[in-house]
Amino acid sequence: MLDDFLVRAALAGVGVALVSALLGCFVLWRRMAYFGDATAHAALLGVAISLGFGISILVGVAVAALGMGLAITLLSGRRTGTDTLLGALAHSALAAGLLAVALIPGGARLDLEAYLFGDILAVSRADLGLIWGGVAVVCAALIWRWQALLVTVVSPDLARASGINPKRENMLLVFALALTVAVAIKVVGALLITAMLILPAAAARPLARTPEAMAVLAVVLAAAAALGGLRLSYQLDSPTGPSIVCTAAAFFALTALARPLLRRRQA
């Protein structure tokens, strides 16, 4: 069955949809959208690290994304404003990645489009195993620490009073975000990862009344966007990563337009 490239692409898309939707809920609740964007921009620097040292792309991207997350965490709260810090680090990492790739022997001839916008149709069996391995690790960590993460999101002071270390939970989110960026780069690319983190969760928010319901609905919408975008790409012969993100954006637009009607019914 896995000899069919479309089946492999669908499995990869669903895997990335699952992990990005779950983590995306926390990204919205913590208002970490720009944090996620900066981490995703570091992915290209990770690609350069991988090519330079001859290691797996997943390992290189995970290391770069984790390094970016740690840098933001350590530097936040100082004299430099958070938005300025995020913007400076995100674009510096992207520029450094592009420069590093160009300086690597043969790097100038490297097609960066696959890393910037994804190349889901080229997913191999090995890629599929790495993607689902990363998905399993991130999802297991989020489910294991679900209540602690929710309490930390609501109030760090309440978390401390409950015996929860907010810094530890924040570091878990940084690790989860880095690994998600690493597994998602093959599917949607470095420039579109943040969209897959935000759009399904944002589309699910108006339709859900509890955090758990929002997470489940976000997973459903993200999976539908992945499969719908794959089908759209196949029919229109369009880039698959952007097609998936556009489908997710359509879901977000529909739920945003339906929000006033939902409020009237609830009233």
Image: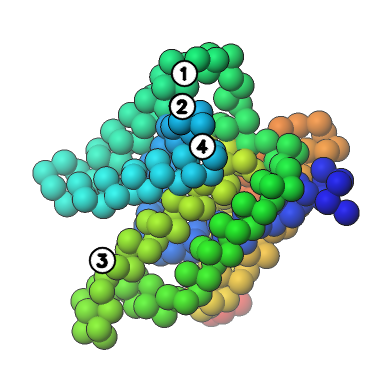
Q: Position of residue 76 (x, y in %)?
A: 21, 50
In this view, the residue in front, 132 or 185, is 132
Q: Hey, what amino acid is under mark 2?
A: Gly
Q: Nearer the viewer, mark 2 or mark 3?
A: 2
- Is the Cβ of the residue at disc 1 closer than 8 Å to that at disc 2? yes
**Number of residues whose C-alpha sits closer than 10 Å to that of mark 2, classed few (under 14), some (14–19) or many (20 or more):** some
Q: Hey, what amino acid is under mark 1?
A: Ile
Distance between mark 1 and mark 4 Cα atoms: 14 Å
SS at circle 3: helix
> In the shown orientation, is residue 31 left or right of residue 144?
left
Distance between mark 1 and mark 2 Cα atoms: 6 Å
Distance between mark 3 and mark 4 Cα atoms: 31 Å
Q: Earlier in the sequence, mark 3 or mark 1?
A: 1
> In the shown orientation, is residue 164 left or right of residue 33?
left
Q: Up-down: is 93 above or below 38?
A: above
Residue furthest to the left: 79
- Is the Cβ of the residue at disc 2 closer than 8 Å to that at disc 3? no
Pointer 1 residue:
104
Q: Earlier in the sequence, mark 1 or mark 4?
A: 4
Distance between mark 3 and mark 1 Cα atoms: 37 Å
Q: Up-down: is 113 above or below 41?
A: above
Q: Earlier in the sequence, mark 3 or mark 4?
A: 4
Q: Hey, what amino acid is under mark 3?
A: Lys
Disc marking residue 167? 3
Distance between mark 4 and mark 2 Cα atoms: 8 Å
Q: Position of residue 192 (x, y in %)?
A: 55, 40
Pointer 2 residue:
52
Q: Hey, what amino acid is under mark 4?
A: Ile
Q: Which residue does the image show at 41% across and 80% down from the upper left?
A: 147
Q: Earlier in the sequence, mark 1 or mark 2?
A: 2
Q: Nearer the viewer, mark 3 or mark 4?
A: 4
